[in-house]
């Protein structure tokens, strides 16, 4: 791919709009993971005019190949999949909202429970964080208890951020650093108890100390690493022993590793499973499925919202799930992800770059091992690849729209970019070659 002619940041349409956004929107964007500062401050395109497959066009008409997380993990089939869009267009033409309920929500509940024979019922939301809040509410209502043992990242809700009350670094090892719990009631301190993945002794300690107080054990069945030594089965046993509801958060990993979710691959049945961004290919939709006795506790609390009844979400989910099944999506994602991971390792060896490739093929990333220079170096990589027409960083979530030809094109350009990184390291010019500030690593306030 030819090098894209850089647009002066101050003259670009994206820059002008983002400057307005920071005056009108606290934090500039609705999602931390979409802040331009997380990628390439002062240079990232910021906004799109069109997205299709694995291609994205910015407001200046520049075309990029998306080799990042592709809609922050939402578009498993690729941006604007034709089959899903056609189903949604028919839904819109027939009216996406009514005084009456949409039949698609019952059809989707049947489908999800058929795919997950352990589950009997489903409730819906439209985002992952609110779906997790619903799951925790149901678990608390069912058990009559308050505390939650958790592992991993589960969104912005009070129940989760309360873990950082008193020590705002508790959540740092669970994906995002520096999450401030301002606005979370201090009375919730001590109600969210963290443990780390594959460290069953930490959950055992929590269970021993708080046995009669734990409403739920909440965790992603996996994100970056496979479970060790029957870890998930041991979690299942502990939750059952103390009478806690086991909640699997499949929002990110669900459907990528295994059709229906990672827990099906490992043969561990939760009491509740939560799906969101991965089930509807970019359209807002979330589902909380679970065992009948547990889910019925939703009727003893108040869990209700108008837009959980609109028809686009379940319609998109039905179309997305049908296509994921037809194209054998997990196999495709595994093949493309492995090709990229192999390419990272090969090119790193060629250019003698010290990096560590990790994660599962459908959720892969690498770490640059250069101490304080690692983040500036990652920022320089993003700058180099943007110049070559790629949205790229050190993380990649493949989609069905990615194919071997796109991977080859990406790796060919990455070869050049890695060569430039090697040269910048050798000449101690990493900072001087950046045309803007270093990318942010986690949550921080924008001035």
Image: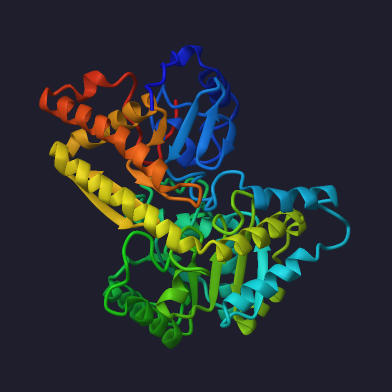
Q: Closest to the observer: 268 or 324? A: 324
Q: Is residue 98 left or right of residue 331?
A: right
Q: Residue furthest front?
A: 405
Do we see residue 119 in this rendering? yes
Vertical position of residue 225 compared to residue 167: above or below: below
Residue 205: % across, % down: 30, 76
Identify the image's colour scheme: rainbow, by chain, secondary structure or one colour: rainbow
- Count of picture labels: 0
Residue 357 x/y as whole percent: 25, 51
Most foreground residue, 240 or 398: 398
**Residue at 29% across, 70% down:** 198
| Residue 108 in the image, given as x and y percentages of width and height | 69, 68
111 and 21: which one is in front? 111
Q: Is residue 299 above or below residue 2?
A: below
Give percent across and percent down for residue 143. Answer: 56, 80
Frontmost residue, 65 versus 44: 65
Q: Quadrant of the C terminus?
A: top left
Q: Is residue 353 visible?
A: no
Instruction: State the residue lying farthest toward the bottom.
Output: 241
Residue 201, by quadrant, is: bottom left
Examine the rendered structure and indicate whether residue 41 appears above or below residue 308.
above
Instruction: Identify which residue is drawn at 52% across, 47% down.
Output: 183
Q: Is residue 443 above or below residue 423?
A: below
Q: Which residue occupies the extreme right position in the image?
A: 99
Say which residue appears at 37% left-offset and 81% top-offset: 233
Q: Residue at x 81, y 62 (%)?
A: 102
- Is the N terminus in the top left, top right, bottom left or bottom right quadrant? top left
């Amino acid at each position: 791919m030819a090098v894209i002619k850089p647009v002066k940041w101050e003259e670009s349409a994206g820059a002008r709009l983002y400057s307005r956004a920071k005056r009108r929107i606290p934090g500039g964007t609705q999602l931390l993971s979409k802040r331009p500062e997380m990628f390439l401050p002062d240079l990232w395109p910021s906004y799109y005019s069109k997205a299709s497959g694995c291609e994205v066009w910015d407001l200046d008409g520049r075309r990029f190949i998306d080799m990042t997380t592709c809609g922050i993990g939402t578009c498993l089939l690729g941006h604007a999949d034709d089959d899903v869009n056609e189903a949604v267009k028919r839904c819109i033409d027939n009216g996406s909202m009514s005084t009456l309920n949409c039949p698609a929500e019952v059809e989707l509940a049947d489908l999800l429970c058929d795919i997950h024979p352990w589950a009997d019922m489903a409730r819906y939301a439209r985002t992952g964080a609110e779906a997790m809040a619903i799951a925790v509410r149901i678990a608390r209502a069912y058990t009559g208890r308050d505390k939650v043992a958790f592992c991993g990242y589960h969104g912005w809700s009070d129940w989760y951020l309360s873990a950082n009350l008193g020590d705002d670094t508790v959540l740092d090892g669970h994906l995002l650093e520096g999450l401030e719990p301002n606005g979370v009631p201090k009375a919730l301190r001590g109600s969210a108890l963290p443990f780390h993945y594959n460290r069953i002794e930490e959950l055992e300690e929590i269970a021993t100390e708080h046995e009669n107080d734990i409403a739920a054990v909440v965790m992603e069945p996996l994100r970056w690493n496979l479970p060790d030594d029957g870890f998930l089965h041991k979690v299942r046993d502990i939750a059952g022993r103390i009478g806690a509801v086991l909640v699997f958060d499949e929002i990110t990993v669900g459907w990528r590793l295994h059709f229906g979710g990672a827990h099906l691959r490992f043969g561990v049945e939760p009491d509740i499973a939560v799906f969101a961004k991965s089930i509807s290919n970019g359209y807002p939709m979330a589902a909380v499925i679970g065992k009948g006795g547990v889910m019925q506790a939703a009727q003893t609390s108040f869990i209700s919202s108008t837009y959980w009844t609109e028809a686009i979400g379940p319609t998109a989910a039905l179309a997305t799930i049908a296509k994921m099944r037809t194209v054998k999506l997990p196999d495709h994602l595994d093949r493309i992800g492995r090709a990229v991971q192999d390419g990272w390792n090969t090119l790193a060896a060629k250019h003698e770059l010290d990096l560590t490739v990790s994660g599962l093929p459908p959720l892969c990333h690498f770490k640059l091992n250069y101490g304080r220079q690692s983040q500036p170096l990652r920022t320089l990589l993003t700058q180099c690849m943007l110049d070559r027409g790629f949205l790229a960083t050190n993380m990649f979530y493949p989609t069905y729209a990615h194919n071997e030809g796109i991977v080859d094109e990406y790796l060919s350009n990455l070869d050049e970019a890695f060569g430039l990184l090697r040269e910048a390291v050798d000449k101690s010019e990493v900072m001087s070659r950046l045309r803007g500030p270093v990318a942010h690593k986690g949550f921080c306030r924008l001035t």
